[in-house]
Image (cartoon, rainbow, N blue to C red):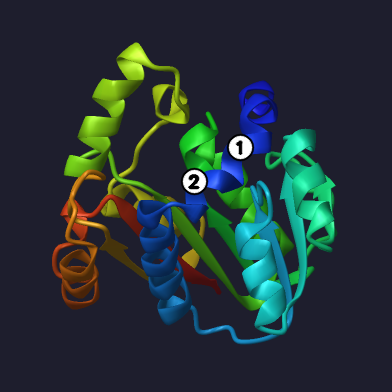
């Protein structure tokens, strides 16, 4: 997968400049940071890509480091003035109990052994530290359409594994996390033109309709 993301790195951020990309980025970040209880400390952005969330964490005052397997993605992140390193999510290059927060957004879709990565996250978190994982939900209208498209055009969705909120919660609980909860946003397909309406639905339905959301997030606390 690193080779694929190396190939698309130069144009990866361009999507966030589109009208749809701006909407998706805005509502996903609203969900992520409304769920997080940790407001400061040392943070790891796991699967940081070009540094979208690394930069946001830095703006919010965290001492943050990003880690990704794609060197080309990391080059772009470093151009933004971010501290990012190349590494393996299965063997994090950090001592035990190093972080107050581990955030991982749209990385878990592209790993084969999520239990190993969750165990590593648990290891590097301090007691009482918080994890939040954001992924795509394959049951949503958005990603049903995207997966169909990927049959004919190569996209990241061709290689992705999707999760449900319940599956993400189970992963965290089995690893020993407590206070586990999940939520979701983005309920309309990507070609939906009425983004103002979509955002109002996101903010109203992010908890009770999460099973239908395109983007789902789960958080937990290390006991």
The vertical placement of 219 against 169, above or below, is: below
Circle 2 — which element? helix
Q: Residue at x 61, y 50 (%)?
A: 119
Q: Quadrant of residue 218?
A: bottom left
**In the image: residue 171, left or right of residue 7:** left
Which residue position is annotated with label 1? 11
Q: CA distance from mark 2 to mark 1?
A: 8 Å
Q: Residue 102 has which mark?
A: none
Q: Residue at x 23, y 54 (%)?
A: 213
Q: Report crowding for label 2: few under 14, some 14 to 19, many 20 or more residues within 10 A (C-alpha).
A: few
Please state which of residues 116 and 211 is positioned toward the viewer in this rendering: 211
Please state which of residues 180 and 194 is positioned toward the viewer in this rendering: 194
Q: Residue at x 76, y 52 (%)?
A: 77
Q: Quadrant of the N terminus?
A: top right
* Residue 64 in view: yes
Please state which of residues 100 and 200 is positioned toward the viewer in this rendering: 200
Q: Report crowding for label 1: few under 14, some 14 to 19, many 20 or more residues within 10 A (C-alpha).
A: few
Residue 157 spot, x, y in % from top left: 40, 29
**In the image: residue 114, left or right of residue 191:** right
Which residue position is annotated with label 2? 15
Please state which of residues 120 and 213 is positioned toward the viewer in this rendering: 213
């Amino acid at each position: 997968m690193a080779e694929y993301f190396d190939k698309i790195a130069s144009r990866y951020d361009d999507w966030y400049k589109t009208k749809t990309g701006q909407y998706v980025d805005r509502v996903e970040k609203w969900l992520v940071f409304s769920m997080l209880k940790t407001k400061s400390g040392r943070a790891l952005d796991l699967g940081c890509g070009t540094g979208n969330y690394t930069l946001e964490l830095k703006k919010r005052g965290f001492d943050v480091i990003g880690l990704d397997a794609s060197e080309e993605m990391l080059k772009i992140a470093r151009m933004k003035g971010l501290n990012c390193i190349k590494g393996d999510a299965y063997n994090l290059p950090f001592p035990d109990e190093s972080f107050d927060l581990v955030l991982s957004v749209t990385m878990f879709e592209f790993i084969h052994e999520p239990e190993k990565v969750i165990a590593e996250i648990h290891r590097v978190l301090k007691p009482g530290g918080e994890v939040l994982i954001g992924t795509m939900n394959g049951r949503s209208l958005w990603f049903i359409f995207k997966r169909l498209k990927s049959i004919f055009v190569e996209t990241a969705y061709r290689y992705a594994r999707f999760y449900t909120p319940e599956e993400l919660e189970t992963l965290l609980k089995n690893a020993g996390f407590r206070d586990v909860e999940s939520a979701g946003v983005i309920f309309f397909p990507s070609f939906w033109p009425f983004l103002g309406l979509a955002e109002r639905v996101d903010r109203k339905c992010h908890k009770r309709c999460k099973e239908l959301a395109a983007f789902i997030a789960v958080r937990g606390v290390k006991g």
